[in-house]
Amino acid sequence: MSDNWIERFPELAALPPQDRQYLTERATKVALPTGTTVFAPGVPAESFLLILSGTVRVQQVSPGGREIVLYRVTGGETCIMTTSCLLADENYAADGVTETDVEAVAVPKAAFEEAIAQSPGFRRLVFADYSRRISDLMHVVEEVAFERLDKRLAQRLLARAGDGTTVRVTHHDLATDLGSAREVVGRLLKELERRGWVALSRGSIELCAPEQLKALAEGS
Amino acid sequence: MSDNWIERFPELAALPPQDRQYLTERATKVALPTGTTVFAPGVPAESFLLILSGTVRVQQVSPGGREIVLYRVTGGETCIMTTSCLLADENYAADGVTETDVEAVAVPKAAFEEAIAQSPGFRRLVFADYSRRISDLMHVVEEVAFERLDKRLAQRLLARAGDGTTVRVTHHDLATDLGSAREVVGRLLKELERRGWVALSRGSIELCAPEQLKALAEGS
DNA sequence: GGTGGTCTGTGACTTAGTCACGTTCCCGTG
DNA sequence: CACGGGAACGTGACTAAGTCACAGACCACC
């Protein structure tokens, strides 16, 4: 397989040539269309996954049908859930779904363990991703337990807007981002619309007063 | 240092003699009295920590002063927070406090990195603990986001009681266990008392009807 | 021009968190 | 022994968030 993908991962690009070759010879590139389930509870992973482009949403689903996004994996990162399954035979109650078309590199279990054993750079990559996910999860706990929903909603709207000014998203999707319920998000959005800070239409939200939203998002 | 502590860690006990010796020569045993702060935000760790006995509570404190327990580290486990600081220079917004007197083994950073590089068993230990903490954190998210507080309270009461029937704990401590507020916990407890399932007194709670509590804790 | 599915709106209600107190109990010190 | 301060707990009034059971509204596709 071509080895240019390895440049996306600084820790791997810095490996000695024989380690790089070891990986590229055993890895296979995979293309996952939007909406693909990458992993799910009860389905043991059989490959280590490096994401090249696109994003994978990792979320938890409650018995009652409510959902919450735990974090997103994007280009240059690895998928801890599958990693843990490989390293510790741990089975998580979360599932991963591609939010966009995703290009990834799959490393078979045996090659993964060999790389872990042989390559300090590869280990650093894996440990760094573990740490990042723990950070992400702690942040989710903090938000869910302590922050007001209107503040978190403003944060999400701004994050999803990027540098643009309109967000294409449903109330339901925002609710799962926040771990809340659709009706609640709908009501909060309508309050924001009443204040003239957003304009609502089916499937998309226009940010009319980003500065006000920013103030709300950052306020104590 | 004496190396009998290593028996508490199956992955380490299984190491070849030279690896065991490498560790025991460089590790130092430390005794931490109840209430010691093991790590805190902004204080970089300089040693890898293996807990021999006792428990360390890892918790998050909100700006508004509310707290939530993320997980507890007990005998035979390692402290991921300090590990991450060593491996990834990550700084977390959590702090660790000993809940009991704690005996631990501290491995200096250099010896830790050497052990990671050399010993597959040591790596397994570290990875397994990472996975366990991710599991713990995901469980906290699930609970906080989706479960009713009375159910979670019943779970905590039963867990703290162990096989006994009285729990020595304040409403405030229960609230930080659950990431809730003291008044709320107090009200729920009084409702349980009204039903005759618990008896309340200052600083301790008597479980009068554990079966009922169990039903509440396990109910949908 | 129906028709089924997705998306959104609404009201009534319950649960949880906040705020500002007041009360009770314990324990050491004068 | 009184008493004073701190810790633990109680309370009421209020706000925020979640739940349930609907009812429209919009879209795409036959």
Image (cartoon, coloured by chain):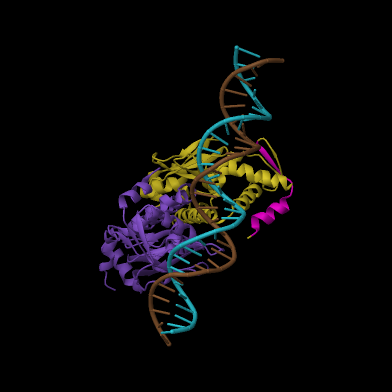
Chain colours: A purple, B yellow, C cyan, D brown
Count of marks, rendered view: 0
Q: Position of residue B97 (x, y in %)?
A: 51, 39
Question: What residue appears at the point 48 percent right and 39 percent down from the top-left corner?
Answer: B65
The C terminus of chain A: image quadrant: top left
Q: Position of residue B166 (x, y in %)?
A: 70, 42
B83 or B199, nearer to the observer: B199
Please check the rendered image and state whether residue B210 is part of the magenta-colored stretch, yes or no.
yes
**Among the 4 quarters of the image, the one containing residue D28:** bottom left
Q: Which residues are magenta?
A: B203-219
- Asked if residue B53 can be seen in this view, the reply is no
Question: What residue appears at the point 38 percent right and 49 percent down from the top-left corner?
Answer: B87
Q: Position of residue B117 (x, y in %)?
A: 38, 54
Please check the rendered image and state whether residue B211 is part of the magenta-colored stretch, yes or no.
yes
Q: Position of residue A50 (x, y in %)?
A: 35, 65
- Above-or-below relation of B207 to A47: above
- Asked if residue B109 can be seen in this view, the reply is yes
Could you tell whether A25 is left or right of B112 in the image? left
Could you tell whether C26 is left or right of C3 in the image? right
A178 or A4, nearer to the observer: A178
A44 or A67, nearer to the observer: A67
The N terminus of chain A: image quadrant: bottom left
B41 or D7, nearer to the observer: D7
- Above-or-below relation of B140 to B106: below
Question: What residue appears at the point 27 percent right and 61 percent down from the top-left corner?
Answer: A13
**Among the 4 quarters of the image, the one containing residue B215:** bottom right
